[in-house]
Image: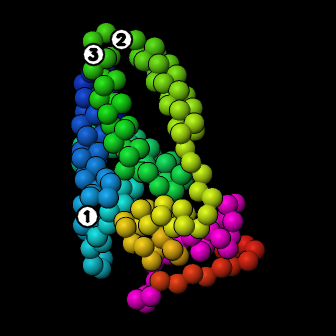
Amino acid sequence: MAAKDVKFSDDARQQMFSGVTTLANAVKITLGPKGRNVILDKSFGAPTVTKDGVSVAKEIELENKFENMGAQMLKEVASHTSDVAGDGTTTATVLAHSILQVGLKSVAAGMNPMDLKRGIDKATGQVVDELEKISKPCEDDKAIAQVGTISANSDELVGEIIADAMGKVGKEGVITVEEGSGLENELEVVEGMQF
């Protein structure tokens, strides 16, 4: 059995935070409508150019295992956000990094970590309540197309296809986006289940 490298306290936290920061720095440049593209090297084939935060996050592996653990935890934030909301992975990553940064400063200054966690949970509930108050539901195809266009990096054609797909499958339907081999964007509706 291989020996385990065990770290405690501030030493462990700082190394893990270093990994979190590395991943957050790679992802945050893709944030927003003026975000920049990232080129991802592949072991086979041509490199991939993307502006998707979760795609960038998934590709990052760090050599130092403690830094890598921190990066992996932040990847979980991006993956969970993608699974639940389908978008906002970069924002979630940047927010998680900032919360962790301030939290580590508070713990270093002597704050009880469990009190900090309870405070974050309470604040999260208040933020979610406020967001629910100010949110506006998309009630027509035009509004859905606008949201789709923003999510598709200002590609209006893709936004219109997303609105069309939402109209065909409804709010409870599943929309899957796949990379095609052709040059045209296509919409295919499949009834029932597909494996």
The residue identified by callout 3 is 108
Q: Quadrant of residue 164?
A: bottom right
Q: Write the residue at 39% across / 72% down.
A: 155
Q: Quadrant of residue 190?
A: bottom right
Could you give the CA–CA distance between mark 2 and mark 3, rounded to whole angstroms?
Answer: 7 Å
Q: Is residue 158 left or right of residue 19?
A: right
Residue 175 belongs to the span the image colors magenta: yes
Mark carried by residue 114: none
Q: Quadrant of the N terminus?
A: top left
Give the residue type that dot 1 points to: Asn
Give the residue type that dot 3 points to: Ala
User: Would you say the residues marked 2 and 1 are in contact, meaning their CB atoms lie under 8 Å apart?
Assistant: no
Q: Write the residue at 53% across / 32% down.
A: 130
Does residue 29 appear in the picture of this structure?
Answer: yes
Mark carried by residue 111: 2
Could you give the CA–CA distance between mark 2 and mark 1, rounded to whole angstroms?
Answer: 39 Å
Whether 13 is drawn above or below 106: the answer is below
The residue identified by callout 1 is 37
